[in-house]
Image: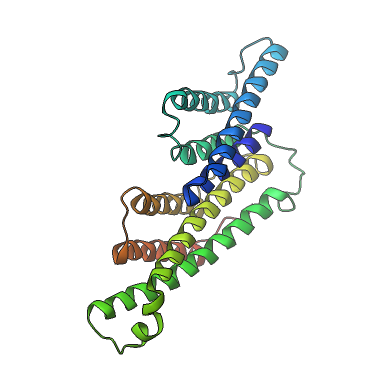
């Protein structure tokens, strides 16, 4: 759990760096990544000493050891390619968080599975994600219609009159809302994984909504990749935002979680 928390904070730090390119985010990311790595070494060492065997016996230990190896490889590469791997940490740290969550042991079955911090975090971050997606959707629609009328020289249209002076602001709000929606969705999925591992006894539930939310996360990762790496802007970027919004709307309103 300590390792998970450290890598969780590290993920947030790397995401802060991606958003604002601020050195503080980079320092938080690498510092807490290091603390997480040290806590993994300590756990493996202590458990191996107590059990008098290397801590890879159970399936949970194997997953935890896999997370440890990924962290070790990232650190080794960072020794030489630190500046080039700054953005890469925003992907590696969440992957390690997810794997560490999978390695958690279940709690007692009589624990209240709906009255705990991880369930509340999952619900809270999920709702926040949809709120951010809604803001991104509105901004994308206004941007597309305003840009279309401007290029069509419809200077007296409602959208040109109302929003032409703030068209760059609309796209900026769309981008930032999409970015924060991705971060919030990541936190929702991570907290969900921890919750199911601890209180349901399953590390992954093969049910439609969880699978679709994971696909939605991958699509938003693709959107951000095209914006950050490929520098995609304009209406093409906004159309991708609307596709993601449609997917989120379907998942939220038409797909339900099973009752545990």
- Vertical position of residue 128 compared to residue 224: above or below: below
* Furthest-left residue in this view: 152
x and y, in percent, of residue 56 in the image: 58, 18
Quadrant the N terminus occupies: top right
**Residue at x-position 64% and y-position 33%:** 104
State how the image is colored: rainbow
- Between 244 and 36, the one nearer to me in the picture: 36
- Between 202 and 65, the one nearer to me in the picture: 65
**Residue at x-position 59% and y-position 62%:** 127
Q: Which image quadrant is residue 238 in?
A: bottom left
Q: Which image quadrant is residue 234 in?
A: bottom left
Answer with left or right where residue 123 lies relative to residue 26.
right
Q: Count how many numbered circles sit on residues in the image.
A: 0
Answer with left or right where residue 144 lies relative to residue 21.
left
x and y, in percent, of residue 260 in the image: 64, 51
x and y, in percent, of residue 201 in the image: 64, 39
- Between 50 and 187, the one nearer to me in the picture: 187
Q: Which image quadrant is residue 9 in?
A: top right
* Furthest-top residue in this view: 52
**Residue at x-position 46% and y-position 37%:** 86
x and y, in percent, of residue 90 in the image: 48, 41
């Amino acid at each position: 759990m300590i390792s998970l928390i450290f890598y969780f904070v590290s993920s947030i730090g790397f995401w802060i760096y991606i958003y604002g390119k601020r050195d503080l985010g980079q320092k938080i990311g690498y510092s807490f990544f290091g603390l997480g790595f040290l806590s993994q070494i300590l756990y493996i060492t202590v458990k191996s000493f107590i059990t008098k065997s290397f801590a890879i016996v159970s399936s949970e230990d194997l997953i935890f050891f896999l997370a440890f190896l990924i962290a070790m490889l990232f650190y080794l590469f960072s020794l030489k390619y630190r500046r080039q791997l700054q953005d890469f940490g925003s992907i590696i740290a969440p992957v390690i968080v997810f794997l560490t969550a999978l390695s958690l042991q279940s709690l007692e079955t009589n624990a209240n599975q709906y009255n705990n911090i991880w369930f509340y975090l999952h619900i809270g971050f999920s709702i926040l994600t949809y709120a951010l997606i809604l803001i991104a959707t509105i901004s994308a629609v206004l941007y597309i219609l305003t840009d279309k009328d401007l290029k069509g020289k419809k200077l007296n249209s409602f959208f040109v009159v109302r929003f032409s002076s703030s068209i760059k602001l609309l796209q900026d709000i769309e981008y930032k809302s999409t970015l924060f929606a991705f971060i919030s969705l990541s936190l929702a999925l991570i907290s969900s994984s921890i919750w199911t591992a601890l209180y349901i006894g399953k590390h992954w539930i093969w049910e439609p909504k969880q699978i679709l939310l994971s696909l939605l996360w991958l699509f938003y990762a693709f959107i951000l990749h095209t914006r950050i790496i490929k520098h995609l802007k304009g209406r093409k970027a906004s159309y991708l935002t609307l596709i993601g919004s449609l997917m989120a709307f379907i998942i939220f309103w038409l797909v339900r979680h099973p009752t545990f």
